[in-house]
Amino acid sequence: MNLSQLYGIPPFLFFVLVIAVFSGVSIGGFMITRKFVGKWLGPPPAQNEVISYYIASTGVVYGITLGLIAVGLWEHYMDITKTVEDEASTLSEVYRNVSSYREPYKTKLTGELKTYTQYVIDEAWPQMEKGIVPWEGINLMTVFQANLFEYEPQTEGQKIIHNNCVMSYNKYVHVRQQRLELVNKGVPKMIWWIVFFGAMINLTLSWLFVVKNKSLHILMNGLLGALIGALVFMIIVLDMPFRGWFRISSEPFEILYDQLMN
């Protein structure tokens, strides 16, 4: 599903819209099928007891399924958050190490890291928020890597610092690649099919009840649709961690730049 156009809607308004859509489908389906259900299934309450059993079973299965999807997405969101924090922390290690190099390498390498960090904050992150993978940063890192490997330590202390810097840099390249690969990783289409198919099964079963009080039946269907809509909204919110209303920000890099590089 392409949700990029939806992210321009204010979150509370979109929350209300999702609930309204599912409640509307639930109530609309009930209104259409109400006059036919009695003819198909016979007079209540016999069929209500059977339907109650099945809707309880499907409701539990569907609820557990949505819960597992939501938990998985939340863990995915937190893992990406940690990846971004680790990336900024590793970049900080690299910067501190090259700050101990002799001139002119110190000025050259720290300057290149500043330029790269500014690029991540000002250009890469806005691109990721639009679903664009910012591959341009590889050119900046290539230049930095060439200058880093050109440096030749002259003392044992410089060798230790240089080895630590190379290790930190290799780790940073790995973590950075992980972030870029996760820019457009969202809920697979198959999962969305399960979510909506399960919703339709539960809503259809709710239409098969025969309740004499029409207003009560409308209220019940509306609340059921609202509950399903709220769960779907939660999945949509967590679907794209770098996009949407609660996206992961570039704050770790901003803190790094302001406190260490600026």
Image (cartoon, rainbow, N blue to C red):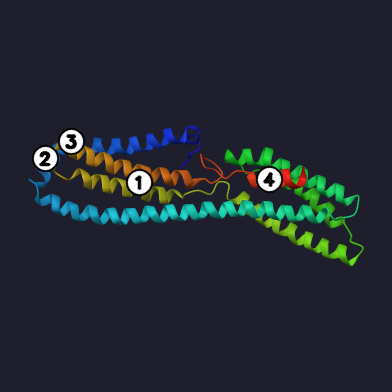
Mark 3 nearby-residue class (10 Å; few <14, some 14–19, many ≥20):
few
Kindly report which numbered mark, 4 or 3, lies closer to the viewer in this rendering: 4
Kindly report which numbered mark, 1 or 3, lies closer to the viewer in this rendering: 3
Rendering coords of residue 122 (x, y %): 68, 38
Marks 4 and 3, Cα distance to the nearest angstrom? 56 Å
Q: Nearer the viewer, residue 49 or 184?
A: 49
Kindly report which numbered mark, 4 or 1, lies closer to the viewer in this rendering: 4
Marks 1 and 3, Cα distance to the nearest angstrom? 26 Å
Q: From the image, tell me which residue sits under label 4.
A: 255
Marks 2 and 4, Cα distance to the nearest angstrom? 62 Å
Q: Are marks 1 and 2 in contact (CB under 8 Å)?
A: no
Q: Is residue 160 left or right of residue 24?
A: right
Rendering coords of residue 218 (x, y %): 21, 37
**Picture quarter with the C terminus:** top right
Q: From the image, tell me which residue sits under label 2.
A: 212
In the rendered structure, find residue 215 and report the number of the disc placed on it.
3
Name the residue type under label 2: Lys
